[in-house]
Image (tube, coloured by chain):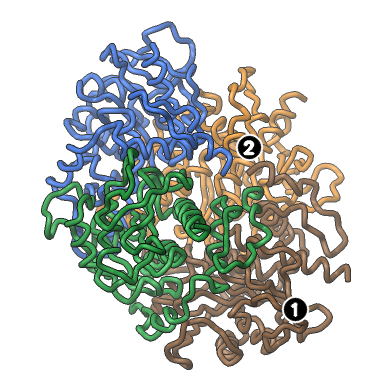
Chain colours: A orange, B brown, C green, D blue
Amino acid sequence: MANLDTLIQDLVIANRILAKEDVVDAYGHISVRHPDNPKHFFISRSLAPELIEKDDIVELGLDGQPVKDEKRSLYLERFIHAAIYEMRPDVTAVVHAHAEDILPFGIAKATPLRPVIHSGSFIGKDVPVWDIAEKFGDTNVLVTNMDQGRDLAKCLGGNNVALMRGHGFASAARSLIEVVRMSVYLPRNARALMRAKMLGGEIKYLSQGEIDARNAGYSPYSTETWRAWEYWANKAGCGHMLTRPDGGHVHKHDHKHDHKK
Amino acid sequence: MANLDTLIQDLVIANRILAKEDVVDAYGHISVRHPDNPKHFFISRSLAPELIEKDDIVELGLDGQPVKDEKRSLYLERFIHAAIYEMRPDVTAVVHAHAEDILPFGIAKATPLRPVIHSGSFIGKDVPVWDIAEKFGDTNVLVTNMDQGRDLAKCLGGNNVALMRGHGFASAARSLIEVVRMSVYLPRNARALMRAKMLGGEIKYLSQGEIDARNAGYSPYSTETWRAWEYWANKAGCGHMLTRPDGGHVHKHDHKHDHKK
Amino acid sequence: MANLDTLIQDLVIANRILAKEDVVDAYGHISVRHPDNPKHFFISRSLAPELIEKDDIVELGLDGQPVKDEKRSLYLERFIHAAIYEMRPDVTAVVHAHAEDILPFGIAKATPLRPVIHSGSFIGKDVPVWDIAEKFGDTNVLVTNMDQGRDLAKCLGGNNVALMRGHGFASAARSLIEVVRMSVYLPRNARALMRAKMLGGEIKYLSQGEIDARNAGYSPYSTETWRAWEYWANKAGCGHMLTRPDGGHVHKHDHKHDHKK
Amino acid sequence: MANLDTLIQDLVIANRILAKEDVVDAYGHISVRHPDNPKHFFISRSLAPELIEKDDIVELGLDGQPVKDEKRSLYLERFIHAAIYEMRPDVTAVVHAHAEDILPFGIAKATPLRPVIHSGSFIGKDVPVWDIAEKFGDTNVLVTNMDQGRDLAKCLGGNNVALMRGHGFASAARSLIEVVRMSVYLPRNARALMRAKMLGGEIKYLSQGEIDARNAGYSPYSTETWRAWEYWANKAGCGHMLTRPDGGHVHKHDHKHDHKK
C-alpha cells in the first residue's frame, strides 16, 4: 500500500508539473497504470490538473469505466488512456494534452515533427498524425469512446507520441517520470524545429543511432532523470510532496520554491 | 437579487480572468446582459479590468448610457456592447479587447482567421474584419458612438467574433463563461494558424460539421466548461469568489492558487 | 516643492513600470525635464530601473553633467536625454531602452517600423533609424558624449521615436505618462507588424489622419490615460505610490496587486 | 579564504540567475576556475541550478574528477568545463546550457549566429558549430569524457561561444560575471537575428571594430557590469547574497525583489 500511495502522490505531482510547464491548462490529463493490476489505471476525476489532490484520483478499467462506484464526473477523453494501455502492454503512463506549440504540426502536414534536440529524442524518430475525421467524419474532435480511442492507439502503434490533428497529442512511456519529461520537451522540440525551418536551409535531425543511444541510457531514477523531476516539482510548488521510490532521501531544499516565487 | 448578485460577482471574476490571461491589459472590457431586462446590460466604469470590484459595475441601456445617475467616467467604447445587444437578442455577453496575437489578422488581410484547433471552434467558421475607415474615414479608430457601434455589429452579423482592423476584436456569446472561453482561445487559435502558415503547405481547418458538433455540445455549466472557469478563476486569484449558479458546491481548493503563486 | 516631489515619485514609478513591462532590464533609462527650469532634467544615477528609489534621482543640465556635487556614478548614455531636451523644447520626457522586439527593425532595414495598431499610433508616422557608425565609425555603439547625442537628436528630428541600429530606441514625449505609454506599446506595434509581414500580402497601416486624430485627443490625465498608468503602477507593485497631479483621489485598490501576485 | 567563500557564493548566485533568466532549466551548469590553483575549478554536484546552495559546490581537476573524496553524483558533462579550462588558460568561467532560442542556429546551418546587437557583442564575431557526430558518430549527444570535451574545446578555439548541434552551447569568459552576461544575452541576440531574417533584406551585423571596442571597455566590476549583476541577483531572489569583491557596499535594496514578486 505504501508503494501505491507514493505512486498516487507522484501522479498528483505530475499533474501539477504539467500545469506549471504549460503542457496542460484546464484541459489535458495524465494517467499511470496500476502496478499490481495491468488492467487498471489511475487518473483524476474531471478537474483542472493544477487543482488535483490525492482524493481526486480514480481507478479505471481498460474499458475507461470506473472500477468502483463513482458519482463524480470523469474526463470525457479517458478512452485515450484506456485504449493505449489495452494495446500497449509496455506502456506504464500516458499523457493527453493540447500544448500549443505542437498544434501547427498537426494542422500543416508539410513538415513532420521529428527530434532535432537531444531533450526531444524521447519522442522517437516518427511522430504520426492522427486525424479523427478520417474514420469518424464530423465529430466534436474529442475521443469519447473506445472505438475512437482504439483508432488513435492503432495510429500511435509502437511510437511514443501521436499528434492529433486540430487538437493535441497523446504520449506513452515506460514510467510517469518519462512521460512527463517527454511531454515537457515535446513542445520545445517543436519550437526548435519550427524556428530552424524559418532560418532556412537543410535541417539536421537527430539520427536513429542517436535516438537509440539516448533511449538505451534512460532510467527513471537515474540522477539525471530525478534532477528534472525534483526541479519541476519544486517549481510547481510541491517539492514537499516528493518521495524517492528507491528509498533515497529527498533533497533538502524541498520548500524553497514556494518561498522564492 | 441573489441571482443578480451572483451574476455581477461572475462579471468581476470574468474581468480578472481576462486580465490574467492577457486578453485585456489596461484596456478592453466585458459586459453581460441584465437577465430580467434585455434592454439593459452590466459593465464596469472606466477602470483596468484587473482592478475591478463589484461596486465598479454600472448598468447601461441599449443606447450605451447609464440608467441611473452616474458621476464616474465610463468606457468610451461602451457602444460596442450596446450595439451588439441591440442587434443580437440571442447574445448574453460581449467582450472587446486588443489581444495581441489576433492583431496581425486584422492588418494583413491575405490570411482569414478561421478555426484550426478544437478549442478555437467557438469563434465560428467565419470571422469578418471590420474597418472603421470604410464608413467613417479618418477617426481615432475607437468606437465612440452608436453609429459606429451599429456598423460594427452589422459587420459581425450572425457570427461570434469580428476583428477590428488595427485595433482588436469584439466577441459575442450565449453566456459569460462562453464569451470568456472564446476570448481566451481566440488568440491561441490565431497563433496556431500563424505558425502553421509558417510551416507551409496546405492548412487543415476545422470543418463546418466539426464546428457545429462542438457548438451543439456546449453548455455553460457542463463539467467541462466549469472546469475551465474554475481553473482560470483560481489562477486569477479569485477562486474564493466562485459560485455555481446551479446550486452545486464550489470546489474545495478555491484559495489554492493564491498560496501557490 | 510638493509638485516636484510628486514628479520625482512619478519618475520612480515610471522606472518600475518600464522594468515590469520588459521595456528595460538592467539597462535603459527614463528622464523628465525640470518643470520650473527647462535647462535641467531628472534621471536616476546608474542603477537598474527596477531598483530605483527617490534618493537615486539626480538633476542634470543640458550638457549631461550633474548640477550639484555628485559622487555616485551616472548613466554613460545620459547624453541621449540631454541632447534631445536641448534640441526639442516641446519635449518633457525621454526614454532610452533596448526593448527586444524593436531590435529587428533597426537591423534589417527592408521593413520600416510604422504604426499598425491604435495603441502604436503615438510613435508617429515615421520612425527614423539612426546608425552611430555613419558619423562616428567603429565605436562601442553607446552614446557617450554630446556630439553623439546631438547626432541622434538630429536624426530624431520632429519625430517621437528613433530606432538605434543594433542597440535600441529613444522616445520623446510631452509628458512622463505619454513617454511610458509610447515605450510600452512600441514593441507591441513592432510585434504586430512583424507577424503581419509573416502572414503575407498587403499591410494596412494607420493613416496619417488616424494618427493625427489620436494625437489630438491625448491628455496625460484623461480617464483613459490614467487608467493605464494606474494599472501598470499596480502591476509593478507601486500602486501605493500613485498621486494624481490634478488633485483627484487615487483609486482605492492601490495595494491590490501586491497581494494578488 | 574570505575571497574563496565570496567566489563560491557568487557561483551560487550565478546558478540562480541562469535559472531565473531561462538559460538553464533542470539541466545546464556553470563553473569557475580556482583563483589560486588554475588546475582546479568549482562546479555544483548534479543538481538543478535553481536549487544549488554553497555546500553543493565541488572542486574538480582538469580531468573532470573530484579532487577530494566525493560520494555525491556529478554532472555527466563536467568534461566540457575541464577541457575548456585545460585548453584555454585565459578562461576563468564556463557555462554549458540548452537555452532554447540558440538551438535553431545549431540545427539549420544556413544562418551563422553572429552579433547583431550591442549586448550580444561579447559572443565575438564567430560562433562555431560543433557537431559531436563528426568525430564520434552516433552517441547520446552528451559530452561524457575528456576526448569529447577536448574535441569541443578545439572547435571553440579562441572564440567565446561554440554552439553544439542539437544540444546547446558552451561559453567561456574572463570572469563569472562576464560569462553570465554573455549567456543571458546570447539567446536575445539569437532572437533578434532570427526575427531580422524574417523581416528580410540585408542584415547589418556589428562590425569587428565595434566588437573590439566593446570588448576593450569591459571590466567585471565596472558600474555598468555590476548594475546587471545586481539586478539579476535581486530578480533571482538572492540580492541578500551579493558581495562586491572590490570591498564596496552592496546596494541597499537587496531584498526588494523578494517582497515585490
SS of the residue under disc 2:
loop
Left or right: D157, with D44 as reference point: left
Q: How many marks?
A: 2
Q: Mark 1 belongs to which subunit?
A: B
Q: Residue C229, position in %: x, y?
A: 53, 63
Q: CA distance from mark 1 to mark 2?
A: 41 Å
Q: Secondary structure at mark 1?
A: strand
Q: Is residue C208 left or right of residue D207?
A: right
Residue at 64 percent across and 18 percent down: it is: A247
Three-letter code for the amino acid on which mark 2 is drawn: Gly
Where does label 2 land, which residue?
A237
Q: Nearer the viewer, residue C230 or B127?
A: C230
Which chain's residue wears label 2? A
Look at the picture and state if B103 lies above or below D106: below
Q: Is residue A151 above or below residue D120?
A: below
| Residue D129 versus residue B248 in the image, above or below | above
Instruction: Give the quarter of the image for residue B137.
Output: bottom left
1 and 2 marks in contact (CB < 8 Å): no
Numbered mark located on residue C57 in the image? none
The residue at the point 47 percent across, 39 percent down is D20
Number of residues whose C-alpha sits closer than 10 Å to that of mark 2, classed few (under 14), some (14–19) or many (20 or more): many
- Whether residue C19 is visible, yes or no, is yes
Amino acid type, callout 1: Glu
Q: Are marks 1 and 2 on the same chain?
A: no
Residue B213: tell me if it is visible. no
Q: Badge 1 is on which residue?
A: B59
